[in-house]
Image: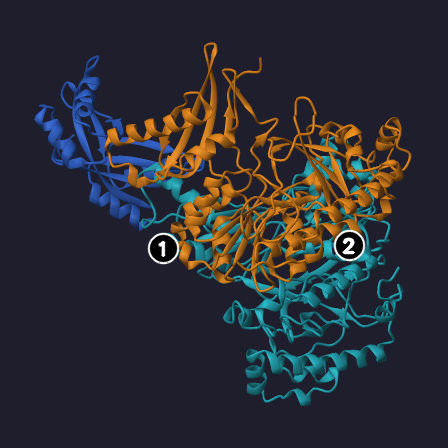
Chain colours: A cyan, B orange, C blue
Amino acid sequence: MIWKEDIETMPLEDLKNLQSERLANIVRYVYENCPVYKDKFDRTGVSPGDVRSIDDITRLPFTTKLDMRDHYPFGLFSRPRTDLVEIHVSSGTTGNPTLVGYTRDDIGLWSDVMARALCCAGAEPEDTIQIAYGYGLFTGGLGFHYGALEMGLTIIPTSSGQTKRQLKIMQDFTPRILACTPSYALYMVEEAKEMGLDPRRSSWEIGIFGAEPWSESMRAEIEAEWNMLATDVYGLSEIIGPGVSQECHLKQGLHVFSDVFYPEIIDPETGQPVAEGQDGELVITTLTKQGIPLIRYRTRDIVSMTTEPCACGRTSPRTSKIKGRTDDMIVVRGINVFPSQIEHVLLGIEGTHPHYQIVIDRQAHQLDSVQIMVEVDERIFSDEIKKMRALERQIQHEIQAVLSVSVEVKLVEPKTLERSMGKAKRVVDKRSL
Amino acid sequence: MDVAFWNREIETMDRRRLTELQVTRLRDTLDQALHTPFYRRRLEKAQIQSGQDLRGLEDLRTLPFTTKDDLRQSFPFGLLAVDFSEVVRLHSSSGTTGVPTVIYLTQDDLDRWTDLLARSIVATGCTSKDVFQNMMTYGLFTGGLGLHYGGERVGMTVIPIGGGNTQRQIRVMKDFKTTVVHITPSYLLHIHSRLAEFDTRPEDLSLRRAFLGAEPHSENTRRKLEDLYGIDAYNSYGLSEMNGPGVAFECVYKQDMHIWEDAYVVEIIDPATGEVLDDGQKGELVLTILTRRAMPLLRYRTRDLAFLHAEPCPCGRTHRRLSRILGRTDDMLIINGVNVFPSQIEEVVMAVPEVGTNYQIQVDKVGALDRLTVKVEIYPKMFTGEAALLDRLKARIAEKLRASITINPRVELHEPGVLPAFEGKAKRVVDNRQEM
Amino acid sequence: MNITQLSVFLENRKGRLAEVCSLLGRHQINIRALTIAETESFGVLRIVVDKPDEAAALLKEHRITANVTNVVAVEVPDKPGGLAGVLKVLADHDVNVEYMYGFVEKSSDNALMVFRFDAVEAAIKVLSDSGIKIVGAEHIRGL
């Protein structure tokens, strides 16, 4: 089933016309309603009248995470704050978080693209879905919730965690669809076996997994362990949350809902478009969003893209899975983490700036573990064990409060942390995804 | 005082028409209940073949009560009254221990519930201009998602932050100039005790209102919170079996909670005999939900103790008002043969100005006797090193408690931060007595 | 009257203590007293040496985290109840002992103990007033 068949299977030429019309509208809209954009366009020397076709998009300036941070919290809004019905915040690179705001129409848009994504993965209206993404400020839980409600699925909003309960609920209500992070799906395998369940006989037939990068080998493992179809969903909170793109059952790339989220792939160094099929940074323009529309937003995710039509009938372009990042962001248990956030916290402790290293690991079928190694120098060293332990705990609590991820802190001697070319190596990622 | 309505017609409907509406809806509810194996058996025994067999509201009293145990025994589908494909949401208490329960809603049920919440929110004076930070847990717990929908329907800006992470809560309150929060009273107290740590004073916040929910609290706790933050705090009542929050909510007059009688038939009974009591008499609250097709519940025993006010409210709403929850039929402590409700103790300690934001009740067995200890945190400025002062304070609290609960407790004074803190529902009672 | 103790931050790993001790040994620095306080992941080595300034410089040079703490070395009668007597004097005068440990060597017939107090000066006064012998840095060097 295709949720918005007329749009999703639209001939490419018609799609292009629709995109062109919408781009012209949104450019005029942000120019008139958002001073930050007006200023950006004026400085680039481009006026709304110059944008007539979707191909004109390359004349427009990019929007970056830095813009969001500099104009935090309300600067990129195109509508008054009172028109927003929902706000989410996600982690920013340092002090300021990234803000996401939705008008009532934006929630409608989100519900629509998520319903499309669920259908794309194979959901049918009579299905039951278990949503094990976290609910709350994280967009995963509520995004799926809105889409499932739009489709008329039966929703079990289990949110994340409490694995035994997740499995018990799966047995009791036999949902056919599971939505969570891929690493959590693997983690639940062990727990299921411990409870005496045979994962291959679970009620889940379709998994919609996202919020963190994952590989084909992880997919093969999930599909074999749970005997289910494992599909990939992509999104980022700045754009909408989950619902930017989704794989269909053929698993040949993620269909971008390009009538509302227009994708480009660029060379991150030059900003120029790359040839079809080449790796580059994904750039997205929101063509219909009202509250905080973003023009040419640089996602910093590296993907490749194809415009060849898919056998499923959808005509939208498809991207590969995420192949990397242009920055140092890492994803831990579905949460975005920037090393600079940790640096910021350490700087705040007694005004010192110790060397540190983040070690991320994942044992087979376990959740990610994060260890922060902090080098102890004279400035933070105390002769008293209780003061050292208090320091350890303080660092741990403050980092956890900022990242929303639990971490372990280990105090180490100076010089023990790996450095390359004299520069400290900040992140050691031991996971094999 | 400005009084606003979400649905003026229903909220101010005259009592006679309200009763008629209840009867009509109750008949539909009985028809719906007859679709479930559980109620078909029961209703047929009571000679009810269809909703039309009910002559008036009084007939409801002839039906047996529904209990939490009934919910457990009919898990998972025994009380489901529609085809499962019509269900759009389920909330389950599925646990790893104990028998779980579940609540089902259709899309229409969800819309009707959301409407009650929108009504409740507007009754407190909130408008679409408010910024609403929802600090209740999201997910299977109904507290978070319930008010979330209500807030969006009213058009407020909802921040679905959930519970916990106090540092982030404070940061978000400041960044987005949050004007209203939905929170447990214990967590709101806890946040206050930590504001200074983040260089924040209550007046740095834009907070104007708090919806207090998910745990019973005393009038003195409310006043304390209102004074600490300079806000209006509104009591709310709900339970997941009745959808969740939004069963009853205070209006701007804050003189107890309007219980939405077009959606619920309300009874107060004597928990021991089951006899229905008059307005003003304290007993167990029993509710029949009239707006849920997926899963009707008739005469559900909430185990919450309260009473009803029938006199009209100055706001013009005709729906009766429910008192604060005075206790639970199952959290009553029996101490040396005397019935004591934790709520009575809270009422006393929170009225003592020297007492801070946290307290704990402990019961031990000493020989054959029970011993009640009330531990309270007091403001640091009280610890002047003058022992006599503290002794006098202790004696004063003990005396006030004795006057209220008739037994003599031990009182312990602690510095702030010593007793366990809660970021959600508080667990204030520690009963160390062995089961007999 | 107080003496210098070096506190050294050490990770809990095999051979680490030996490495630090042999580093000192190679530079002719003699350890007079030593104790280790540890947690699961790290420990603090506390030592009294004959040449504290040299030792501190040496550790710094090798980027080993260490700091200097003032402690008091006290002669304790080497007989049953000897230590208890000293502790009673301290307790009677409300002097708080953070930690303490023994010397490797004895001084005459008495055992030597290292005390760390939160209020060093006050502690020294109490001990002196009670006739308990405090050992100075000179004496340590000569041991």
Q: Which of the two labelled residues, at mark 1 and mark 2, occupies the earlier sequence position?
A: 2
Residue A315 falls in image quadrant: bottom right
Task: Give SS at disc 2.
Answer: helix
Task: Give SS at disc 1.
Answer: loop
For the image, the number of numbered tags is 2
- Do the numbered discs 1 and 2 sit on residues whose CB atoms are within 8 Å? no
Which chain is mark 2 on?
A: A
Q: CA distance from mark 1 to mark 2?
A: 48 Å
Side (left or right) of C63 relative to C33: right
Label 1 environment density (alpha carbons within 10 Å; few <14, some 14–19, many ≥20): few
Q: Nearer the viewer, residue A26 or B219?
A: B219
Side (left or right) of B344 relative to B80: left
Give the image location of residue C32, x and y in percent: 23, 31
Q: Nearer the viewer, residue A274 or B37?
A: B37
Query: Which quadrant: the C terminus of chain C?
Result: top left
Q: Nearer the viewer, residue A160 or B198?
A: B198
User: Given the current orientation, which residue lies at the most extreme right position?
Assistant: B49
- Do badges 1 and 2 share one subunit? yes
Tell me the residue that label 2 is attached to.
A148
Give the image location of residue A64, x and y in percent: 58, 72
Which amino acid type is marked by label 1?
Answer: Thr
Tell me the residue that label 1 is attached to.
A352
Q: Nearer the viewer, residue B300 or B36?
A: B300
Residue A88 in view of the camera: yes
Residue at the image point whose x is 43% and y is 33% from the top = B348
Which amino acid type is marked by label 2?
Answer: Ala
Q: Is residue A125 above or below residue B217?
A: below
Give the image location of residue B182, x and y in percent: 56, 50
Give the image location of residue C140, x and y in percent: 16, 32
Label 2 environment density (alpha carbons within 10 Å; few <14, some 14–19, many ≥20): many
Q: Single out the mark in the foreground, 1 or 2.
A: 2
